[in-house]
Image (spheres, rainbow, N blue to C red):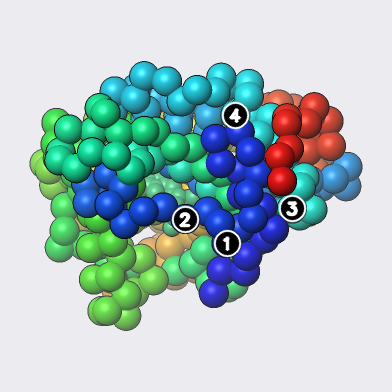
Amino acid sequence: MLTPTEKIWHNGRFIPWEDARIHVLSHVVSYGSSVFEGIRCYSTPSGPAIFRLQDHIRRMIDSTRIYRIESLGFSARELSEAMVEVVRVNRLQSCYLRPIVLRGYGEMGVNPMKNPVDVYIACWEWGKYLGDEALAEGVDVCISSWKRLAPNTLPALAKAGANYMNSQLIKMEALTNGYSEGIGLDEAGFVSEGSGENIFVVRDGKITTPPLGASVLPGITRDSVIRLAGELGIPLVEGLVPREMLYIADEVFFTGTAAEITPIRSVDRIKVGSGRRGPIAEKLQKEFFAVINGTKPDPYGWLTPVGAAQPVSVAE
Ligand code: PPE
């Protein structure tokens, strides 16, 4: 169960956790009209630090643009300060941040343009997404019978609430059938991504990840792993991945804010490689965790220290 924190940021003010409520006839409830982000804040020796904050804010603003939300009423800088402040006022060392932009209460009907746009930012402590053992042991996954969003239906580059109805179908089916996670194929039948993770495949020392055109979310962790692989001299391409490549790969792993870098040890009960975390996933994890835990200097500028930002107005 979710453990509440004290405060949630709403349109520029802090409100008590339990007061962050919406009316049942808010546009978002009937029509799924929200965009959101998921961001991790890590505990480092110099205090809490938010991972790739500016990149998450940029993607959130991209999502609002796709859905014709013209203004949030807050600049990227103000949003960034608000996120830092949310962590600070809740006095957390490490947490998960969930900014949500939603079409609120006012008119009913599909047209959202007259409804107010509300911005919330919450945070809470969130442990390991796919179980405590997942990062070291790997997870068992299946190919979903549900495909991902087809191009030009629901835009996959937007992180919109409605997209997660598709993710829920994939996830529920996987769990019902005894797997930890499901992988969606794209409209053409190529590998797309997990219900809440991007995917990477390794064969003969070379990494492939599906391109953005394969109905994937442009993951921030995906981008981080692409960068880390470059730094570590591991060849990586963005390219179409046929389903059966998962069965003959040496390694397969997921990336995501919640899942971080999670090895996959079997797909459809076919063992991936040796059936355990492979050396490339382990190498990437090591580098990734060294940076995010602050045990190694952050050469990428990925961490925003929570201690260093200026406070925004805090109303009780
Ligand atoms: N694809 C999907 C569909 C997705 O939801 C996520 C994040 C990713 C890829 C990875 O993106 P990124 O986090 O930027 O590396 N999924 C978020 C939501 C998880 C949830 O259950 O809620 C997350 O990992 O925070």
Q: Which of marks 4 and 2 is in front?
A: 2
Badge 3 amino acid: Asn
Displayed quadrant of residue 94? bottom right
The Cα–Cα distance between marks 1 and 3, rounded to whole angstroms, is 14 Å
Badge 2 amino acid: Arg
Under tag 2, what secondary structure? Answer: loop
Residue 45, placed above or below residue 51:
below
Residue 73, placed above or below residue 258:
above
Split into 4 quadrants, where in the image is the N terminus? bottom right
Query: How far across and down, in percent of the image, does residue 140 sit?
Result: 38, 71
**Residue at the spot of label 2:** 21
**Residue at the spot of label 1:** 18
Q: Ligand 1 near label 3 (Cβ, under 8 Å)?
A: no
The Cα–Cα distance between marks 3 and 4, rounded to whole angstroms, is 17 Å
The Cα–Cα distance between marks 4 and 2, rounded to whole angstroms, is 20 Å
Query: How far across and down, in percent of the image, does residue 133 sit?
Result: 58, 73
Q: Earlier in the sequence, mark 3 or mark 4?
A: 4
Q: Which of 173 and 99 is in front in this view?
A: 99
**Residue at the spot of label 4:** 79
Q: Which of marks 1 and 3 is in front?
A: 1
Q: Nearer the viewer, mark 1 or mark 4?
A: 1
Q: Which of marks 3 and 2 is nearer the N terminus?
A: 2
Under tag 4, what secondary structure? Answer: helix
**Residue at the spot of label 3:** 90
Residue 73, placed above or below residue 238:
above
Query: How far across and down, in percent of the image, does residue 209 sit?
Result: 37, 39
Badge 4 amino acid: Leu
Neighbour tally class for label 2: few under 14, some 14-19, many 20 plus, Cα within 10 Å: few
Q: Residue at x 43, y 62 (%)?
A: 264
Neighbour tally class for label 1: few under 14, some 14-19, many 20 plus, Cα within 10 Å: few
Report if the CB atoms under discs 1 and 2 are less than 8 Å apart. Answer: yes
